[in-house]
Image: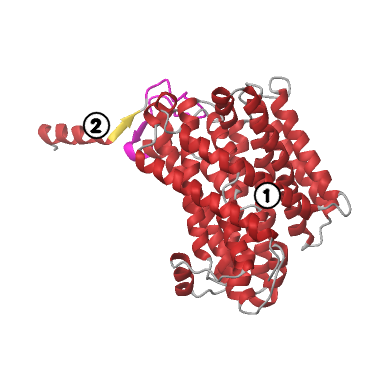
Amino acid sequence: MRSTTGGRRFDAVLERSVVRVPATGLTHGHRYRVSPGRIWTRERGLALALLAVVGPGVLAGLSDDDPAGITTYSILGADFGYRLLWTLLVSTLALALFYDLTVRLGCATGKGLVSVIRMRYGAKAGFSSAGFLILANLGTTAAEMAGIAAGLEIGGVSRYLSVPLAAAAVTTLVLAGSFHRVEVVLLVIASVFITYIAAGILAHPHWGQAVRGLVVPDLPFRRHAILVATATLGTTLAPWGLAFIQSYAVDKKLKPSDWNFERIDVIVGAAATGVIGFFVVVACAETLYRSHTHINDASNAAVALAPLAGHLASTLFAVGLVGAGLLAAAILPLSTSYSVAESFGKEGRIDGNLRTEPIFFVTYIAMTAVASAVVLVPGAPLVPILFLTQAVNAVMLLPFLAMIAYLTRDRALMGELRIGAVSAWAAWATTALITVTVGALGVFSLLPGH
């Protein structure tokens, strides 16, 4: 027979260790509902709160590992082995910092990046930002479609089949899906990046050399080495990624109270980006670099891996390339659609439709269709298009970083989410570093030599 005193003590402990959810449930933003009156442990309550905000950081981070990024990592590993891995660590830290700042800005203001620019600097600045983003994002979206085509062509699928199907798939997803459904599908697509981890492990890398390359800076003073290093440092952060993560956080209806949990999502997304890049580099370093095999893009790397690391590693690399292209091909037009809608003073919503959000959805359809058409044009000058895209991205990135660093210190704008002196110093130092790398990239791109 249990004593009355013991029973009261047990009840008191139980009362302190659970969270009783009210019958009204959770209604704030895009949340997962809880059954009325259901009892959750405190740990389950925290997990539920974290799940409610997951998405912006993970999707923005992993979409940065697009075919162009995978190509950069592949060339880095194939041409320099483990020596330049440290540039990946630096770029990952920069990515985490500025994605955190843009999410803060979105949570604090309830507005996307172009909306904040329009509000602070006028409609002309808003339209100019959106116009440059359209130009840059169109070329980058074409590159994503080209990555999908290259990955599937390894398996014998014609680009005249793969590109239209990919364009139709991502457009149908966004047009017909709710916010939650779109987010879940994109997160599922993002899971394909695990293939790069598997490909890296199958290459049997020297982990000690890899870790040393990650933490010990080493830079051969040659034009090609400096180009690859500055490309990794200077192009990891892209204007479309900054615009997407802030607008997506606003579309998800995140508030200042969500920021602590969303920060975890941002850090996990940036870390995942770095981890994927790490395994791409080590896969190519341990195989292509040791066999003195030179490549021009990620699809070359996938083919070249077969005799060196096995057909499974090669297949996994190609599958990862297709998945990376699909994720980025869905997110880049979203970033553009948000920005164009915001330039007209509206906040785009995935939960809307063509009738309620015509600017948002027409922009998405047009971006996807034009980018796909460019890839399918025989003899299309994709390399000059990509060069122009990178140039526009570089020009836009620097003022974006400076504005974000400045605006997140504005107490009237940010309220309780205003960044402190240490974060501000880190933001301006990172901006200065990326300014130097972008400038170096431009100079060394024009210089002749090996």
Q: Please give the name of the residue rendered at 60% of the width and 23% of the height, measured from the top-left corner.
A: 122
Q: Could you say which quadrant of the image residue 295 lies in?
A: bottom right
Up-down relation of residue 177 to residue 428 (above or below): above
Q: Secondary structure at mark 1?
A: helix
Outermost residue toward the bottom in this view: 291
- Three-letter code for the amino acid on which mark 2 is drawn: Glu
**Quarter of the image containing the N terminus?**
top left
In the image, residue 320 lies at what x, y percent? 65, 58
Q: Which of the two discs, 2 and 1, sits closer to the camera?
A: 1
Residue under label 1, please give it.
390
Which segment is the magenta one?
Answer: 22-44
- Three-letter code for the amino acid on which mark 1 is drawn: Gln
Q: Please give the name of the residue rendered at 10% of the width and 33% of the height, measured from the top-left corner.
A: 5
Is 359 part of what is drawn in magenta?
no
Q: Secondary structure at mark 2?
A: helix
**Residue 55 appears in the picture as rendered:** no
In the image, residue 153 lies at what x, y percent? 79, 60
Please report whichever mark, 2 or 1, sits nearer to the chain's N-terminal start: 2
Magenta: main secondary structure? loop
Q: Is residue 275 left or right of residue 67?
A: left
Residue under label 2, please give it.
15
Up-down relation of residue 397 to residue 229 (above or below): above
**Residue 161 appears in the picture as rendered:** yes
Q: Is residue 246 left or right of residue 66?
A: left
The alpha-carbon separation of the residues under discs 2 and 1 comes to: 58 Å
Q: Relative to the observer, which residue lies in front, 305 or 239?
A: 239
Q: Please give the name of the residue rendered at 77% of the width and 55% of the height, measured from the top-left corner.
A: 383
Report crowding for label 1: few under 14, some 14 to 19, many 20 or more residues within 10 A (C-alpha): some
Q: Relative to the observer, which residue lies in front, 407 or 65?
A: 407
In the image, residue 377 lies at what x, y percent? 87, 49
